[in-house]
């Protein structure tokens, strides 16, 4: 059905148009609310019942067509970071400003599930392969994103990617990350390889690829519920905060935004990149939620 305010209502999932013309899905069920933009298949909000939003978006974000959104969970695909061979191509892949096809998979009182997808034709000089990328978003007591890539081509290709999750923080000084101690990481700022320390302090620019076992990682702060990031199909976690100087170079990012966000990103990056043979597929999954007494 269509309402008088140009909103298409599909049970607990509604589709509307933002002030700047971007199509989005608004999801409200008994356990959570979420906002999902069709441009980039981009989650910008996930609010579990009786809790604050688990995703962060800059107040400077204008939500413009054709411009990647600063915050939420951008989809970096089919490469993470700079293009592997030509810096003239955009960072973080091809799909952040494309409009994805979509359909409802489940629409239950306590769980909503949407599938979105794109296909490449092999004609783009930045990625000359035929492939299908599909994102399944599950909004329940926790938020789950599963990104599946299928090689539709007759030759193999290399895949790196990330579900670039921006999480809100109260203060950098209070941030504690647990679950990474002892795992090796590559510091993208220095090129050095080190081991994650027992105690991590967020007091400077951080851009690290942690090569781990895909175990749960926890974000702890005084006065906030403990949060978790779980992953499947990932043995690399990106930890990123631009700090002061880098913040001044970023688009749609206030100079002091670094004080209120931290990225903990499920990825296939660095040594964890994947090679897909013809017909093969790979699924990268992340789950974000609030730790309960039953969680580790």
Image (cartoon, helix red, strand yellow):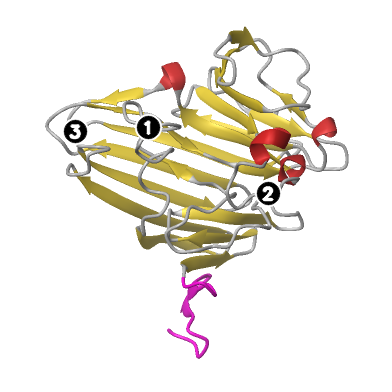
Q: Give the x, y percent position of residue 183.
A: 61, 12
Query: Which residue is at 20% across, 37% downward?
Result: 128
Q: Secondary structure at mark 1?
A: loop
Query: Which residue is at 59% across, 44% downward?
Result: 250
Q: Is residue 179 magenta?
A: no
Q: Is residue 200 left or right of residue 98?
A: right
Number of other residues with Cα within 10 Å of mark 3, as a class: few under 14, some 14 to 19, many 20 or more: few
**Circle on res. 54:** 2
Instruction: Give yes or no for contact between labels 1 and 2 (Cβ–Cβ under 8 Å).
Output: no
Q: Nearer the viewer, residue 137 or 293?
A: 137
Q: Give the x, y percent position of residue 192.
A: 58, 10
The image quadrant where one finds the C terminus is top right
Number of other residues with Cα within 10 Å of mark 1, as a class: few under 14, some 14 to 19, many 20 or more: few
Q: What is the distance, in whole Å, between disc 1 and disc 2 at their CAs?
A: 33 Å
The image quadrant where one finds the N terminus is bottom left
Residue for badge 1: 87
Instruction: Give yes or no for contact between labels 3 and 2 (Cβ–Cβ under 8 Å).
Output: no
Pointer 3 or 2: first along the chain: 2
Q: Give the x, y percent position of residue 97.
A: 41, 54
Q: Is residue 62 left or right of residue 49?
A: left
Q: What is the distance, in whole Å, between disc 3 and disc 1 at their CAs?
A: 29 Å
| Mark 3 or 1: the one toward you | 1
Query: Which residue is at 78% across, 23% downward?
Result: 201
Predominant SS along the magenta part: loop
Q: Secondary structure at mark 3?
A: loop
Pointer 3 or 1: first along the chain: 1
Q: Nearer the viewer, residue 92 or 31?
A: 92
Give the magenta range. 1-21
Quarter location, residue 59: bottom right
Q: Is residue 14 magenta?
A: yes
**Circle on res. 279:** 3
Q: Secondary structure at mark 2?
A: loop
């Amino acid at each position: 059905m269509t309402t008088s305010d140009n909103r298409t209502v599909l049970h607990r999932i509604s589709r509307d148009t933002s002030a700047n013309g971007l199509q989005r899905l608004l999801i409200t069920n008994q356990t959570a609310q979420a906002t999902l933009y069709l441009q980039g298949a981009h989650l910008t909000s996930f609010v579990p019942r009786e809790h604050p939003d688990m995703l962060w978006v800059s107040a400077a974000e204008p939500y413009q067509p054709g411009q990647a959104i600063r915050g939420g969970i951008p989809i970096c695909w089919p490469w993470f970071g700079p293009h592997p061979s030509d810096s003239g191509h955009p960072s973080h892949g091809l799909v952040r400003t494309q409009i994805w096809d979509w359909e409802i998979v489940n629409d239950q009182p306590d769980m909503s599930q949407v599938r979105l997808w794109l296909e490449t034709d092999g004609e783009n000089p930045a990625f000359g392969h035929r492939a299908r990328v599909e994102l399944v978003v599950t909004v329940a007591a926790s938020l789950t994103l599963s990104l599946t890539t299928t090689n539709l081509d007759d030759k193999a290709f290399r895949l790196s990617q990330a579900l670039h999750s921006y999480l809100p923080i109260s203060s950098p000084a209070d941030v504690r990350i647990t679950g990474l101690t002892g795992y090796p990481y590559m510091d993208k700022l220095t090129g050095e390889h080190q081991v994650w320390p027992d105690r991590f302090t967020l007091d400077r620019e951080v851009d690290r690829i942690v090569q781990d076992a895909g175990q749960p990682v926890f974000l702890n702060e005084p006065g906030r519920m403990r949060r978790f990031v779980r992953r499947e199909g990932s043995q690399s976690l990106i930890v990123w905060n631009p700090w002061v100087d880098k913040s001044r170079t970023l688009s749609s990012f206030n100079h002091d935004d670094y004080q209120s966000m931290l990225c903990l990103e499920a990825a296939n990056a660095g040594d964890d990149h994947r090679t897909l043979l013809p017909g093969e597929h790979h699924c990268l999954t992340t789950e974000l939620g609030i730790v309960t007494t039953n969680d580790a």
